[in-house]
Amino acid sequence: MRMDTFDNLLTHIITKVGESSLSDEEKANVYAQISVGLYALVWPILMAHMPERDLANAVDNPKDWGMDRYTNLIGKALSDPQTPKEIYDELMGALTEVEELVSSKLTSLPSQSQP
Amino acid sequence: MAEAQTAIEKEQGSSLPSLIADVFDRRVQNYRKDRRLIRETYEQKFEKLLETLPQESRDTTAIKIQKVLVKIGGFFSEYGARFTDFVRNVVMWPMVRATRDFPKDKYYQIGLARAKAWGEFARDTTKTATAERMAYRNHFLPTAVVGAEIGTAAGALVSFPAAVGVGIAEGAKYGLVAGVEGAAIGAAVGGAIGGAVSLALKLKDRIIGPPVLYYELFASNPASSWVRTGSSGPSVPGPSSGWQSA
């Protein structure tokens, strides 16, 4: 069952990093990279599922650009049943890789004190 | 023994941020290749469009945002509430930024910093620490410091997933102001667990954005404050009930 797997995986990563002996700056950097990476991964998938003609129209006619055209493009991208699945699979794949990295690099006991 | 292990971890852990950046960057590049780059010609232009969505008033955007969020809720319902809210946050951000009177609160500032860092991330394959990324990292620093304090107090007895589960089971409610979060949850499940739950939630809110209920977009009174009003994560109800904010 996929329900909440994403949330649990993210929580596990946060726990592991939080309990590690990394400095506060390094922890903050890890969280920031995960955050930026997750956001960056969604857009190429959404764009790939936007009708090419609509996308071309949008970028070629910036004067007509507005919230209605934006929501229309997003709606069309999401109406492809493959889109949510691809977004989920890509993000879970990435988070799983991150979790493996974190587990392999952070192996010590939980820190007792921090600088 | 433990000290030696910690030293090894510190050495190995210092490479984590760049390795994590590699993971996402590789996936973005692979996805583009799989798609035969069909959209690459539009990508930068589209990013620019996202940044320059014409400004509208909150009254107007609230309705438009609501429609998009409901749609996303329908398409992503099987993937869990937190994941659905994450996608909502991604899609909502350009609209939020284009809302003239959107409150410039801490989550707005985080979103803005993230967007700048993301722009760099998408184009910069050298993984150099740019000013934007450093600035964005700093949005996590206060939380990381709080985490160290909680970690020292609570020890390693409580795992975060278990604590979150307990917190949700107890119907934990939390507010926006730091300290209130831990206090409200802690009252139900104990101070240490509450602190751990609070920390995990705060970090997740920063990483993937707060639950969309936070924005109270659909309040009948537009002048009401935009504060988190519901519980978080998996306990957030589906779209149909989420939009009837107090």
Image (cartoon, rainbow, N blue to C red):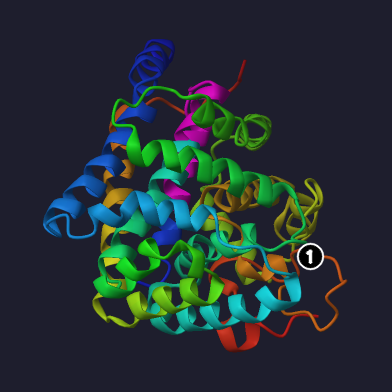
Is label 1 in a helix, a strand or a loop? loop
Q: How many marks?
A: 1
Q: Which residue is mark 1?
A: B226
Query: x, y percentage for residue B166?
Result: 60, 63
Q: Main secondary structure of the magenta part?
A: helix
Magenta segment includes B146? no
Residue extent of the magenta highlight? A10-30
Residue B216 locus on image (x, y percent): 73, 72
Could you tell me which quadrant the C terminus of chain B lies in? bottom right
Q: Residue at x 47, y 45 (%)?
A: A35
Chain of the residue where label 1 is placed in the rendered structure? B
Relative to B37, is B175 on the left or the right? right
Horizontal placement of B132 versus B226: left or right?
left
In-front residue for pair B79/B189: B79
With respect to residue B134, does B8 lie above or below?
above
Q: From the top left corner, tell me how far across and down residue A12 is, in percent.
A: 43, 48
Quadrant placement of the N terminus of chain B: top left
Give the residue displayed 49% in from the left and 57% down from the top.
B50
Q: Is residue B172 above or below residue B134?
A: below
Q: Answer whether residue A28 is magenta in the image.
A: yes
What's under tag 1, amino acid-wise? Trp
